[in-house]
Image (tube, rainbow, N blue to C red):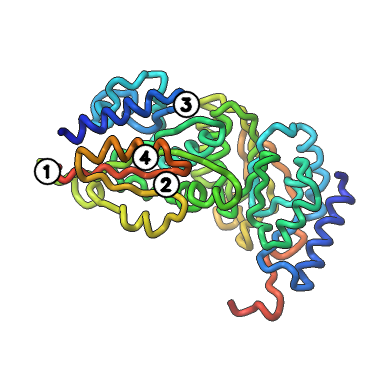
Amino acid sequence: MNAEDLIEFETEVAAAFEAGHIDGPVHLNSATQAKPLIEIFKDIKREDYVCSTWRSHWHALLHGVPRDQVMVEILAGCSMMLHFPEYRFMSSAIVGGMLPIACGLAAGGERVWCFVGDMCATTGAFADACRLAAARSLNIKFVIEDNGLSTNTPTKLAWGQKELQVANTHHYVYTRQCPHYQPLPNQRGF
Amino acid sequence: MDFNAEVNKAMRLLAQQENAVFIGQSVRYDGAAIYYSLDGVPTEKRDEFPVAENLQLGYCVGLSLTGKLPICIYPRMDFMLLAMDALVNHLDKLPMFGWDPKIIIRARVGQKKPLDAGPQHTQNYTHAFRQMLTTVDVFELRRADDVLPAYELALRNKSSTIIVENPANG
């Protein structure tokens, strides 16, 4: 898939959400993610495991999960928890939830790519996972997707930090394009 | 029949499984009850893990998806509270998403005699765990003759099992 395909997919999801066809929260990718993600996924093989987050539409598509299959799951309200075992693709709606599992997969001999957000990269769970991965020479790559926000909390401001630097990781910065989760007018007040 | 001797028999039984790996603290290093309970388990099947309870349980989940049978050991049930995300949000929920992790979690309820280790080392959360879990079975063992059958059942179980060792006679 190229950048245009990815953006078109997300536009379709947004339209379905706005039309009230998706009965669950949706986390859309931003156009600024397309280029860095396409580059990263050039190194990810089909037989690799991809452990993703609640913003995982493009990760799944770029890992080879068919477009229709991803769309069906999103329309079923599973945007935050896309799982495709046959494609070795899993995700979690919990911050850092994939980190220990990714380490275990790698310890079992698999090649693993684990995506996290910038706030996750500041957590103890992330530090533990990186330490274990290094100590045991696990075949795992961590990718930090940095939009400067955790939901709506500014990561660096909340931690009082100026920079977010983590050694031995992929790290790319993008700008969030859509609200974290914008309820439709008839859903407000929950 | 001695409770601890039965636990050791159960550990030896699990160790006969080619894919079994015992993960936790004091599994390779002498000085704690867990170590003695693994007497006879080959060293190469023991993975001494850092004290990182949630990482340990999640690691076992990932390992199980590669075909291993992790036996995830906590010397006190109190310590499992630090692994609740991996247990409740992930191990318990992954079967709902098409994955089939299978691990055996072994936890011990700290006894109050001859020494009372206090309220942070002696709690039994079996009931609370049962309330929270939907795909993971929870067995509480009180009698020695229940030990081996429970571990045999856990071995046959398609899903994951928590076995809480809480001997009635301390």
Residue at 40 percent of width and 36 percent of height: B155
Residue that numbered label 1 is attached to = B113
First of labels 1, 2 by sequence position: 2
Kind of residue at disc 1: Lys
Give x and y (percent) for residue B133: 43, 55
How crowded is the residue under tag 3: few (<14 C-alpha within 10 Å), some, or many (20+)? few
Q: Are marks 4 and 2 in contact (CB under 8 Å)?
A: no
Horizontal side of residue A131 vs A183, given as left or right:
left
How crowded is the residue under tag 2: few (<14 C-alpha within 10 Å), some, or many (20+)? some
Find the distance from the CA under tag 1 to the CA under tag 3: 36 Å
Kind of residue at disc 3: Asn
Horizontal side of residue A69 vs A126, given as left or right:
right
First of labels 4, 3 by sequence position: 3
Q: Secondary structure at mark 1?
A: loop
Give x and y (percent) for residue A181: 67, 66
The quadrant the N terminus of chain B occupies is top left
Front-most of B9 and A99? B9
Q: Report in which chain the residue with disc 1 lies.
A: B
Q: Is residue B145 above or below residue A14?
A: above
First of labels 2, 3 by sequence position: 3
First of labels 1, 3 by sequence position: 3
Residue that numbered label 3 is attached to = B19
Q: Are marks 4 and 3 in contact (CB under 8 Å)?
A: no
Residue that numbered label 4 is attached to = B153
Q: Secondary structure at mark 4?
A: helix
Q: Is residue A102 above or below residue B13?
A: below
Q: Are marks 1 and 3 in contact (CB under 8 Å)?
A: no
Residue that numbered label 2 is attached to = B83
Find the distance from the CA under tag 4 to the CA under tag 3: 17 Å
